[in-house]
Image (cartoon, rainbow, N blue to C red):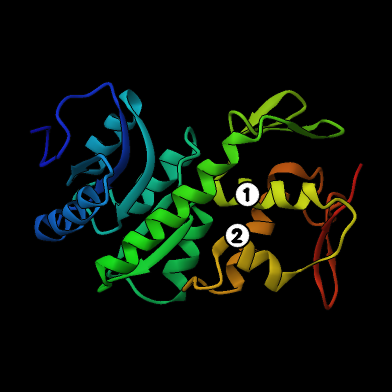
Amino acid sequence: MANGYGLVEGWDQVVDILIIEDNVELATLISDFLLNEGYSVFVTSSGEEGLLYLEENTVKLLLLDIMLPELDGFSVCRTIREKHNLPIIIMSARNGDDNKIIGLELGADDYMEKPFTVNLLTAKVKSHLRRSYDMVENKQLLSDGDLTINRASMTVYLKDEPIVMTSKEYELLVLLMENKGKALRKEWLFETIWGVDSFSELSTLTVHINKLREKIENNPKQPKRIVTVWGVGYKYEAV
């Protein structure tokens, strides 16, 4: 038994899913489902311990509660995004658009309101893992001027400096760059990245577009790479 009430023995390892949740009953229920699906899981009730675990181990996906003792989930999410690109799914009893927007702007890839069914959560976990890690198989580089995407390592560089991105920001940028010069409908972009059955709002796409512009545009308010096509959606313009 690992620290907290983890379900994977030892540290310094590769773990499919890290769960940071202080409700022991809920965390155990979720982990049992995921273990039955064949995933390796580590569970902790502390944001601090979760961050420490990430420093010493490789994790493929994070399930993150917001209302944690001491260091809250929003702070944990912000800290993780400074160093890691793994998908983050927030699980929270804080309902409403304001909390969802905060979570997405801090770098979360999805936001699930409690209560939810474990079957739905498991489906989302599978979807995020598939979308994030299937892309590693393509080894080619995507480049445009001083912007480069290395698909093998799922990293993005601007002027030879690495850019920290969420998994959804990364997937969206890849999709846009793969379709340079093409006007892509908002609905198509959203369904391709988040899935047709996603419970997220279309406004999630706008949040991620704005975040991408802040990271890759010289002037995010007057974007040259990711431009708006009014009445349609967005397109990537080569520089």
Q: Hey, which quadrant is residue 222 in on the image?
A: bottom right
Left/right placement of residue 230 relative to residue 26 reads right
Q: Is residue 169 above or below residue 159?
A: below
Number of marks in the image? 2
Q: Earlier in the sequence, mark 2 or mark 1?
A: 1
Q: Is residue 194 above or below residue 135?
A: below
> Is residue 238 or residue 213 the one in the foreground?
238
Q: Mark number for residue 193?
A: 2
Residue 106 is situated, as x and y percent measured from the top left of the image, at 49, 52
Q: Mark number for residue 60?
A: none
Q: Mark 1 is on which residue type?
A: Glu
Dot 1 alpha-carbon crowd within 10 angstroms: few under 14, some 14 to 19, many 20 or more: some
Q: Is residue 96 above or below residue 89?
A: below
From the image, tell me which residue sits under label 1: 171
Residue 84 is situated, as x and y percent measured from the top left of the image, at 47, 35
For image coordinates 77% across by 27% down, the residue present is 159
- Report the quarter where the C terminus lies: top right
Q: What whole-number distance in Å separates the C-alpha atoms at marks 2 and 1?
A: 7 Å
Q: Hey, which quadrant is residue 66 in on the image?
A: bottom left
Disc 1 element: helix
Left/right placement of residue 33 relative to residue 133 reads left
- Report the quarter where the N terminus lies: top left
Residue 206 is situated, as x and y percent measured from the top left of the image, at 66, 66
> Is residue 48 or residue 50 the one in the foreground?
50
Disc 2 element: helix
For image coordinates 69% across by 64% down, the residue present is 189
Left/right placement of residue 215 relative to residue 182 reads left
Task: Look at the image and tell me whether residue 164 can be seen.
Answer: no
Residue 77 is situated, as x and y percent measured from the top left of the image, at 40, 47
| Dot 2 and dot 1 residues touching (CB under 8 Å) | yes
Q: Mark 2 is on which residue type?
A: Ile
Task: Look at the image and tell me whether residue 227 can be seen.
Answer: yes
